[in-house]
Image (tube, helix red, strand yellow):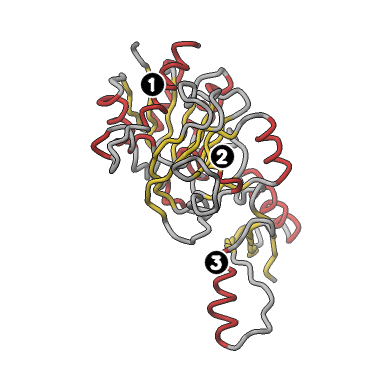
Amino acid sequence: MPMNVVVIQFSGSTCDRDLVNAMRNVMEWDVDFLWHEKAMKNLEKYDAIFLPGGFTYGDHLRAGIIAAFTPVMSKVKERAKEGVPVLGICNGFQILVESELLPGALIGNETLRFSCKWTNLRVETERSAATNIAKKGDVWKVPIAHGEGRYYLDQKGLKELNDNDQIVWRYTTESGELTKEANPNGSIENIAGICNLEGNVVGLMPHPERAAESTLSPWETEDGKFYFQSIEKFLRRS
Amino acid sequence: MPKFSVEIIIEGKKNARDPEGETIMRDLMIKHGYDMVESVRSGKILKVNLEAKDENEAEEICLKMVNELRIYNPVAHMCVIKLVK
């Protein structure tokens, strides 16, 4: 199926080419890789919009906040309202939160350190654009690489997220147990990724694009592929 | 137009753990004899110099700005605006 997707590059994006590589060479999608000012001009033509990881604008003030105010994000918000999948990975997730496309905040890791390691993600819902080929309870091996990945939300907001089935992934052990040790950054309720009410806007701190080829994984897993395959299925359905 | 200095202080909400503040208190202050310290919260200060008609307007501009530009994330942070006399 021809996929008409765009990866938006901002000043300070660093995982953009990894993402394009996974899409082009692993998934065999047609991908446009565009500077944010250029992406703004024809965002209407894309079936899905990706915000890659990195350190946009040096993470100054707060990760994602300055990119959230670039003009392209107003267009991204419009497309998200129309039901177009908008996927943010790592810094992309931080941009989605700071744009208020997703609720909550991503604050400094509890360890006070930048953390780069493999994690286990338990799929919590099958209804998001990025998990619809998975089964609830599946555990994916996907690495993190962030300093500000601690998901935070107040108790009221957290209840709403749970009640509305908006928590998409949690950090767990390999066997899917929710433990403190499995939580790499102190995220509330071990949350690794969430979606909006409709399920088309999805933010994830770990990097599926770094886990989509067996050669990148110590266990020769390709769990990141489930993320991209889900988006493909979501688009086929819509 | 008169000039004013304003401090915008951004601090994490109390329910969100502040490991930086905890470490400063535990491993620096208390370990070095300042055991009367009961709590420390770390944060960020933006020192803003601006032009405004008067003090009230300087504060109003900063208040509008911090909310409009999400200088703090209201989910996780508190923000205090202080005019520097």
**Which amino acid does the dot numbered 1 rest on?**
Val
For this orientation, the residue located farthest to the front is A175
SS class, disc 2: helix
Going from the N terminus, do you reach mark 2 or mark 1 first?
A: 1
Position of residue A210 in the picture relative to residue B66 (left or right): left
Residue under circle 3? B20
Quarter of the figure that contains the N terminus of chain B: bottom right
For this orientation, the residue located farthest to the bottom is B33
Residues marked 2 and 1, same chain: yes
**Which amino acid does the dot numbered 2 rest on?**
Val
Dot 3 surroundings within 10 Å: few (below 14), some, or many (20 or more)? some
**Which amino acid does the dot numbered 3 rest on?**
Glu
Q: Which of these two is toward me, A169 or A6? A: A169
Q: Position of residue B73 (x, y in %)?
A: 62, 48
Task: Kindly report the distance in space between the C-alpha atoms of the residues bearing marks 2 and 1.
Answer: 21 Å
Dot 1 surroundings within 10 Å: few (below 14), some, or many (20 or more)? many
For this orientation, the residue located farthest to the right is B56
Residue under circle 1? A5
SS class, disc 1: strand
Q: Position of residue A209 (x, y in %)?
A: 35, 34
